[in-house]
Amino acid sequence: MRRLSLRGQIASQLILALVALFVLIPIWTLAYLAFDGGVSGWPTEFRIWPEQFTLGVFRQVWQRAVEGFGYPDMLRNSLFVSGGAAVLAVGCGASMAYAFARLRFPGKRVGLFALLLGALLPPVALMTPLYILLTALHLRTTLLGLTLVYTSFSLPFCIWNMRAAFQAVPKDLEESAFMDGADHLTAFWRVTLPLAIPSIAIAGLIAFLIGYSEFAMGWLFVSKNADVTLAMAISGMLSDGFASWSNMAALAMLMSVPVVLICLVLHRYLLSGLLGGLADSEG
Amino acid sequence: MMGAPAPPVPRRSNRLWQIGAFLLVAALALGLRVRAVQRLPIDYDEDDYLTAAQRYAAALRLGDWHFVFNYDYNFEHPPLTKLAYAAALLPLPDAPAAAEHSSSDPPAASLPEPHFRLARCVAAAFGTLEAMALAGLNPLAGLFLAIQTWQIKYTSQIMLEPLPALCSTLAVVCYWKARGSGGGARSRWLALSAITMGLTAASKYVYCIAGLAVAADWLWASFPTGLAGRSGRLKAIARWLAPLVGWGLLAVAVFILFDPRLWVDPIGRLRQSLLFHLDYAQSQHVKEAGYPIWQPFVWLSGSVPWHPGVFVISLDLYISLLAILGFRRLWNRQRVFALWLVIALAFLTGWTTKWPQYLLILTAPLSLAAAQGFSGSVWQPLTGWLRRRRDASRAPVRQRPRQMDETPVSHWKDVRRALPWLLPGTMALLALAIYPLVYQGAMALTDFNATSIRDGIQGGVWRAVWQGLTGQVRPVPVDLFVSSAVTFARKVHFAGPSVLVQLLGGLGADVLFFNVLWVVLTLSLQAALGIGLALILNRRGLRLAGLWRSVLLLPWAIPEFVGAMFWLRLFEPDYGWIPEGMPHDIPLPSFFADKNFALFVLVIAATWYGFPLIMLAASAALKSIPLEVYDAADLDGAAGWRQLQYITWPLLLPLVAPALIIRSIFSFNQFYLFYVMRPPFPLTTWASVSFYFFNAIGPSGGQFAVSAAINIFTVLVLIGLLLVFNRWTRASEGVTYA
C-alpha cells in the first residue's frame, strides 16, 4: 500500500471530519442542554450554544433528580443490579463455560447452539414468564428480582464468551499440569482461570453494561422510587413530558461519561469480547 | 456397479402426469374461487363496476351504440372488462343500479341479484383460466397462483383485475412459446401474444407492465453482435427493432379495436384517462390511505387479512419466500418472467397509489419464481438426500473413519466427569432461561392476560394447558391484534396454538416485513459506512488517525437509549433541533405521521449507533493483513481498486462476518430505539410489539399470552436465522461449533 498522497490525505481528512460531525452533532444538541440553566421543560428555541452557561444543573441532579433521590442513590441502585447481574452471570457460568471448552459430553453441540440462541434473544423475550415467576416468589418488586432478570439476559452470553476465553488458553499448559498429576479442577483453578481472567472480566463488563443501560424491564419490576436506577430515571423523565430537558441531559451525561471513557480505553478487548467465539475458527 | 440404471421415464406417462396436474390445478383454482364468490363480502368498487356493466348491458340490448362509444362513467379505466361483465348480464332482465355514493363511503350493503353473483362468477372464470394458462407452462406455478389469496380475492369479486391479469399472462406465455418454436408456429405465437397484449391494454393499463418485460427480454435476447461499418450497423439495429415494433403495432391496433371509447376521439380520451391516474396518485384520497412506499411487499408477506374463513389455505408468505429463493433460477431459465417480476415490483414501489389489487400485475411471475424456488431449494435437495441415503444403504458397509470426538469412550464416563462442571450453570439456566422459555410456550397456548393474572400465578396456566392437551376442554378463540382478545375472565383458558399459527401464516405481515426491511437497510448502511471508514483509517500515513478513531467510536460507547434520545431531540416535530432550525417556509415532514420519513430518520439513527462496531471489527481485520502483501502488489503494478478487490476484500470479509451477524441479529431485535422514539405503527420490531402487548399500562397491554406467542415466534425465527448463518459460515467451521 502506497503512502497517502497529499490529495488523498486532504480527501480522507475531509471525509473523516464530515463523519465526525455526523457523530458529534446529535450528541451536542442534547449535551449542551445540560449546561443551560434556562430550559425548564423541553427546548423551544433553536440554539447551538447554551443561553446561560452554568454547571448548576449538574449540582441539582446530583442532589435531587427524581422525587428526592439524587444521582448517588440511583447510581448505587444501578451498580447493585448490573454489578450483581455481572457477578452472578460470571460466577454461575464459569464452570459450564470450561466444560464446553475442554470436556466431552453428549449433547454438546445442541447445548452450544442453545447457548448462542439464548445469547441472541432480545431482552424482552423472557420477560413475561420471569414477571410471573418472580411475582410468585414475591421477589418481583425488589432490586434482587431485577438483578435476577438482568442475569437472565447476560447468562447465556457470558457462558458463550467465557468458553471462547478458556479455549484461547493453550491446551498444552493444561496438559503439562495433568502430567504433574493435577486433575481438571486443579488445572482449571491454577492454570486456565488465571490466564483467562482478562477475557472473563470483559465478559463481566459487557454483562454489567447490559444491565446498566436497561430501563424498560426495570419499570415493570421495580415499584419504589428508592429503587430506581439511573437508566430508569432518565427514561422516566423522557416519558413524563414535563420534566426539564436540562436535568435529563445532565443525568444522561453523568450516566454515560464514565461508561464512554471505559469503553474507549478498553475498546480492543471489548470488541473481541463482543464477538467472542464467533470469530475464532478453531475446529 | 451400483444396480441397474433407472429406466427412462416413458414420455406418455409424463404427459399424463402433466395433464392430471393441470386438471387438478384447474379444479382447485375454480373451487377456491367459487367458495370466495359465495363468501366474500361486497367490497369497495364492486358496485361501480356492476353499475357500469348494467348500463352497458342495457345499451347493448337496445343497440344504443352511441351510448357504448361515449359512456364516460369511470372513464379512467378502459371498458373491455366492464363490457365483458355486460355481455354476461345480457340475458338477465334489467335491474335498478346501485345508488351513487362517494368513494370514501363504506361499500354498498346489497347489490342486485342475480346480476351480482353472475358477474362475480365471470371474474372467477377469468381467474381460473389464468391459473390454467400458467399451469400449462408449469403446473406448480399454476398451483401457487390458484391458492394465492390476493389472487383469489381479486379474481372473485367484480373488479377490473381478472381479465387483464389473464390477458397479460397469456401474452407473456405466448411470447415464451414463440421463443421456443420456429417458423410458422413462432409467428402464430407472436401474433397471439400481441393480440392478448392489446386486450390487456383495453382492460386495464397497469397490466401493460408485462408488455415492458416482453420488450426488454426481446431486445436483450436478440441484441445484434459483430457490427461492422456504419450503414451495416444501422441496418442491424433496424433489423433488431423491427419485429418488436411490428408486435407493438399489432398490440396497439387490437387495443384500439377493443376500446370503443377510443373510436371517437382516440388521442384526447386516451390522454384524459391516463392523466387521471397521474393526478390520482397525488390526490388526498391516496395520501389518506397512509401506505408507506414498501406497502406492496407487506401485502406479499401475508395473506389477505380481512376475510377470515374464506380462503382455506393461506400460504402467501411461503409463496413469496420461495419466490425469493427461486428468482435466480427463474432468471436463468425463463428470463422474461423474471424481468416481469422485477419491473412490476419496481413500479409498485415507486408508484404512490398502493391498492392491494395492483399485486395482480405480478402474481403470475411470482408464482413461477416460487415454483422454481420449490424445485431448486426444496424438491431437488430433498430427492438428492433421499437418493444418497438409498445409495448409502445399498453400498457395502465400510468402516467410517472415526473422528476425534467419537473415540469409543463410554458416554457415561464423560457425563460423570462433565456433570459437576455443568451443574451450577445448568441450575442457573434452568431457573432463568429454560423454565421461563417452557413456561412461555405454555402461556402461548392460553388466553392468559392481566385479568386472570392471579389464577395464572397460582398455576392456572399449567392447568389450562394440561386440560387442553388432554382434550378435557375445547380451545377458546384468541385473535391477535384485536383488542377484544382480552376476555375479562378471571380464570385462564386453553386457547390452542391459534395465535402462533396465525403469526406463522403471516398475520402481522406489516411488522414482519418491516422487521426484515429494517435488518437489511440498517445492516447494509452500517456495513458500508463502517468498512469504508476502516479502509480510510488504515491508510498508511493518515494523520490524526487515533483521534478520529476515538471520535467515531463514541456512538458505540454510549448506551443505546441515550443515543436514541439524541435522535429524538433532533427530529421530534415539536421540540426537535432540526424542525426548530428549519426556515418556516420549508416544512419538514413529521416524524410521527410520515412513515417514509420516519423510516429515514430511524435508519440514520440506527446507522449512527451501529457502524462503529463494524468499523472496529474491520479495522482489526485490516491490521491483520501484512503490509508486505500490498508492497508485493505494488511491485506487480496492481494498485488502488485492484488491491481492494483482490487482496483486502477477500481477506477482510471472513473476519468482519461475525460482526455483521451480531449486528444483524441486534437489528432484528432492536427495541430501545423504538421504545424511545415511538415511530408510527407498523414501524416496529417484533421485540417492541411483544413488549407493548405485555406492558399492562399500555392500551393493548396486559395480554401475556399474545406477548408470549410473539416471543416464541421470535425464537423460531432466530433459530432459522442461526441455521442459515451456520450454513454460510460452515466453511470456516461455523458460528456454533467454533
Image (cartoon, coloured by chain):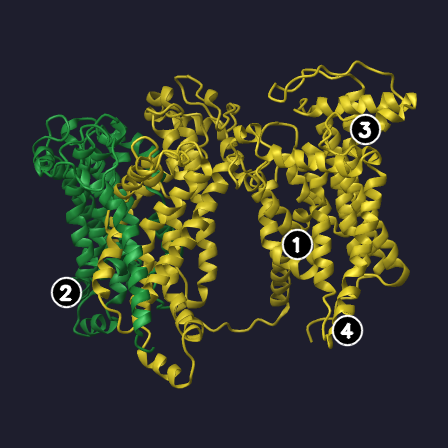
Chain colours: A green, B yellow
Under mark 4, the amino acid is Gly
Dots 1, 2 in contact, CB < 8 A: no
> For the residues carrying marks 2 and 4, which lies nearer the camera in this image?
4
> For the residues carrying marks 2 and 3, which lies nearer the camera in this image?
3
Q: Are marks 2 and 4 on the same chain?
A: no
Numbered badge on residue A190: 2
Numbered badge on residue A67: none
Mark 1 / mark 4, whichever is N-terminal? 4
Mark 4 / mark 3, whichever is N-terminal? 3
Question: What residue is pinned by disc 3?
Answer: B85
Can you give x and y, in whole percent of width and height, for residue B116 in the image? 77, 21
Question: What residue is pinned by disc 4?
Answer: B232
How much space separates mark 1 and mark 4, taking CA atoms?
33 Å
Can you give x and y, in whole percent of width and height, for residue B122 in the image? 80, 30
Dots 4, 3 in contact, CB < 8 A: no
Assign a secondary structure to mark 4.
helix
Assign a secondary structure to mark 2.
helix
Question: What residue is pinned by disc 1?
Answer: B338
Categorize mark 1 by other alpha carbons within 10 Å: few (<14), some (14-19), many (20+): many
Assign a secondary structure to mark 1.
helix
